[in-house]
Image (tube, rainbow, N blue to C red):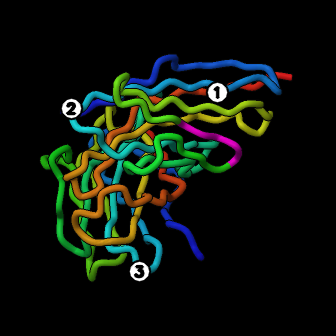
Amino acid sequence: EAGVAQSPRYKIIEKRQSVAFWCNPISGHATLYWYQQILGQGPKLLIQFQNNGVVDDSQLPKDRFSAERLKGVDSTLKIQPAKLEDSAVYLCASSPGTSGGAGNEQFFGPGTRLTVL
Amino acid sequence: AQSVTQLGSHVSVSEGALVLLRCNYSSSVPPYLFWYVQYPNQGLQLLLKYTSAATLVKGINGFEAEFKKSETSFHLTKPSAHMSDAAEYFCAVSPLISYNKLIFGAGTRLAVHP
């Protein structure tokens, strides 16, 4: 079974530029998550999709971050404009099950390491 | 808001020694609890999870964790460390009604020396 795919693996940009990350979850997984992992910290949930609808984006900085999940499969996360503090690893995860499926394992991709100069 | 505290950002053990990584959570209602491992330049991999069944949970690679409600703890142990166990370990909670949201601790980096 193929795992969660993410691209690119690494990205270096200058502040105020824009950047986009792509995620392809495990086939058939209804729920998709984007996490931000700053160096030395645990991952923090940015946004969670159930199929193609958002169920939690309470920690997404909406003035600069946006995400979409078209057709309930692939997802993109965009930052525009980037700030120095956005330097982090952006992890995508997916899990089976529908809304309210607490306790389900989340399967993580390898992440995209973003450096903002 | 729920939170997770991992005591010790770095733990170093000798090969063959006991591994003990500590995790405490804050919640009046026991949540679901998880331990994930992250190897360099890789995503997180589930080691084990507690979902209100047995309080002693066995996971992959010889790891296990015990849920103690009275201590709000979910410490991770392994009787004998192996060099390949060197990695970063994250404890996480998922509130019972949360659409499977995970709240992670800051992580503990485990070093294993010969």
**Which residue, given by chain and number where applicable, does mark 1 sit on?**
B110
As shown in the figure, which amino acid type bears the numbered disc 3?
Gly
Q: Quick check: A103 above or below A69?
A: above
Q: Write the residue at 48% across / 60% down.
A: A107
Magenta stretch: includes residue A86: no
Q: Nearer the viewer, residue B42 or B72?
A: B72
**Which residue, given by chain and number where applicable, does mark 2 sit on?**
B28
Q: Which residues are magenta?
A: B61-65
**Which residue, given by chain and number where applicable, does mark 3 sit on?**
A28
Q: Quick check: A114 above or below B79?
A: below
Question: Where does the image place residue B99, in percent across and percent down from the top left?
Answer: 23, 58
Q: Residues within 10 Å of mark 3 (few under 14, many from 20)?
A: few
Instruction: Determine contact: label 3, label 1, CB under 8 Å.
Output: no
Q: Is residue B20 rendered to the left or right of residue A49?
A: right
Distance from Cα at disc 1 to Cα at disc 2: 30 Å
Question: Where does the image place residue A82, in percent across and percent down from the top left?
Answer: 28, 43
Distance from Cα at disc 3 to Cα at disc 1: 34 Å
What label does residue B70 carry, if any? none
Q: How many marks?
A: 3
